[in-house]
Amino acid sequence: MATQREKLCVEYPLAETIEQAIAWIKAGNSCWQEDSNDWPNCGGFDDVEDLKYNFEDGIDKSYNIHLVTKEPEMAEPFKVDDGVVSLVELRYCGGQDEDDKIDEGMVCYIDRIRLDDNGNQELYFHDHADRYGPWSAADFVLNVCGDEG
């Protein structure tokens, strides 16, 4: 089977409290938060003081603070019905209407998955006709933040 895609910060679980995030950083890991102007990219906090300064009143999962391990990880393969976020703008193949595309940061839900000759996942989505797919899993990350990202 092919190597799994590299895990990106946005795929890590979300901190539920400021205390959890502080303990995570103190253990040598990182906390990253999406920049809503540049979704799905993330920015990190330099240290505990930086985190406390930015969130004096605490946090919950709605702040989208990801708990990122100090050691790099490989992402688990996607599953049917997973919500995934496009990392780049993707144009449909086959010369269809110019406006037919998946925008960067768009959330899509997997209808089915097939493997290419190298064992890499290729995705089909509920909201996009099969004639436009398959889409390479390498262009997507798991959405852990709900519909809006």
Image (spheres, rainbow, N blue to C red):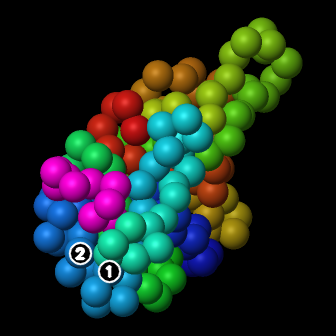
Q: Secondary structure at mark 2?
A: helix
Q: Is residue 61 above or below residue 89?
A: below
> The magenta stretch spans which residues?
51-60
User: What's the amino acid at mark 2?
Assistant: Ile
Total labels: the figure holds 2
- Asked where in the image residue 15 lies, by quadrant, the reply is bottom left
User: What's the amino acid at mark 1?
Assistant: Ile
- Asked where in the image residue 92 lies, by quadrant, the reply is top right
Q: Is residue 129 above or below residue 1?
A: above
Marking on residue 22? 2
Who's the residue at 85% across and 18% down the image?
95
Marking on residue 25? 1
Binning the other alpha carbons within 10 Å of mark 2 as few (below 14), some (14 to 19) or many (20 upward) gives some
The image position of residue 17, as x and y in percent, is 14, 61
Marking on residue 13? none
Binning the other alpha carbons within 10 Å of mark 1 as few (below 14), some (14 to 19) or many (20 upward) gives many
Q: Main secondary structure of the magenta part?
A: loop
Q: Is residue 37 left or right of residue 51?
A: right
Q: Is residue 55 left or right of residue 42?
A: left
Marks 2/1 in contact by CB < 8 Å: the verdict is yes
> Split into 4 quadrants, where in the image is the N terminus?
bottom right
Task: Please name whichever residue, 140 or 117, is drawn nearer the observer in this view of the structure.
Answer: 140
Residue 84 seen in the figure: yes
Q: Is residue 35 above or below residue 101?
A: below
